[in-house]
Image: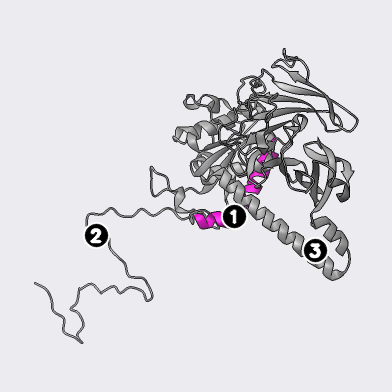
Amino acid sequence: MGTNFQPGHLPPPNTQPIQLPPPNREPVVLAPPGTQPVQLPPPPPPGMQPVKLPPRYVTAANQEQLYDYYAFISYSRKDEKWAQWLQKKLEHYQLPSVIRKEDSTLPKKIQPIFRDKTDLTTGQLQAALIRELNASKKLIVLCSPTSARSRWVNEEVLQFISQGRIADIIPVIIEGSTSKTDETACYPPALRISGGQQLLGISIPDLGKSDTFLRVVAGILDIKFDQLKRRNAQRKKRQRFIAAAATFVVLAIAGIGGYQAWDYYVPHESYYADYVLRWGVPEGIGELTKKELASREGHYIIVTQQRQVKQLIHANSAGIPSIHQDNEHIDRPMISHFYYRDDGNIEYVEFLDHNHRVLATQVYTTDLLAADFQVSAADSSVRTLAGATTSNAVGLFDFGTADFDDGAVQRSDIARYAFEYNNDGYVTQIIYMRDRRTPILDADGIGGLEYTLDTLGRPIEVRYLGLDGQLPSLGFL
């Protein structure tokens, strides 16, 4: 039987006082009957803010788990400078805003990145280190002959694999070979045998620091490398244009160096009878005046800007881009655009047709000793060359023809050139390659070319080479 209290009267003795909530407190909402209580995560250590990552970092196995780090960098202490460079580069990199607009779950910055600074010398992996590994979205392994022999790098890889996360491992090759097990091997044993499949690495010697870094970013965020590279290049181009325009305006207003600024930033055309490539960049031979162009069937236009060659165009007497008609130069493209790395060396060359459609792209390694052929700077799909070196119709580079993509020209498996240079930077030998390690013959049984050059770097004699570097039965050109 309940007790009724009259308004204005105190409750009877021995009754419990009513507990009122403190003022300004949110009302407590109880869970429906039969539901499990919510388990709240422990608070972060004093002075540390919890890391809030986008929803994409929730695992499939446990929808409540969030990672504390975008990546864990595993490395040998002898490779610490590379680890420091990569961590700093990742944490300071801002993803292009266009990509973030296309996917709102992507972060503006990739931080934090975990890099262990302790020196493990005895015992097993520390429990704290295992926790950091398990709390990282990706494992970046810096691969070198030194790290391949590191017990702790191997232990960290094994720990990650034990969580069923081999697909989240990103090998970054500093030096060494992925296919060997001798002193040049760069993969730790766990990467060479895990699951019976060897992960593909991102090679700094082959791709350069810039492309390697962007591929790591793409791997961490699970986005397409080609998309990221294209958007990143567009942003850099805008930034250079804004910087150039600002510099030009400042110099013009100040009234000092105005002409020098104009001469530096405005493209300039020069006309030549011929050219040679020096370290992959064209140098004109036999400069022509505009008056002389009218009496020539063809000439070369070299466009320079900011003291770099930006374009090379083969044109007729009217200045209209045209393909080469002579067999001697049939392999030369009609239009070429040149792009450079931060160190000033050539990075890649785009070959275009008369409609300025990109037909193929030649991407150089950082040491310039090889170049891969791919569809475009944004699309790294392999672009193989034509079938035969000696074809009088198109040569290996049918880049000036309209039927490049329609299957009219027989294609080979040549996807890379390996170069030898003389001391002046002129190519003296080209070896045809299927990939980074495999030499290949074209349809005529030719595996490469060897040049004798004049004093200006032009070929005066060309020899065909076989797979063994010797002359095949074809003889000389």
Q: Secondary structure at mark 3?
A: helix
Determine crowd level at label 2: few under 14, some 14-19, many 20+ residues with C-alpha closer than 10 A: few
Amino acid at dot 2? Pro
Distance between the alpha carbons at the discs numbered 3 and 2: 68 Å
Q: Nearer the viewer, mark 3 or mark 1?
A: 3
Q: Which residues are magenta?
A: 76-102
Write down the quadrant of residue 164 in the picture. top left
Q: Residue 231 location in percent, x, y? A: 60, 51
Residue at screen point 62% across, 21% down? 180
Q: Secondary structure at mark 2?
A: loop
> According to the image, label 2 marks what residue?
32
Amino acid at dot 3? Phe
Label whose residue precedes the other's in the sequence (3 or 2):
2
> According to the image, label 1 marks what residue?
96
Q: Residue 120 location in percent, x, y? A: 61, 34
Can you say which quadrant of the picture contains the N terminus? bottom left
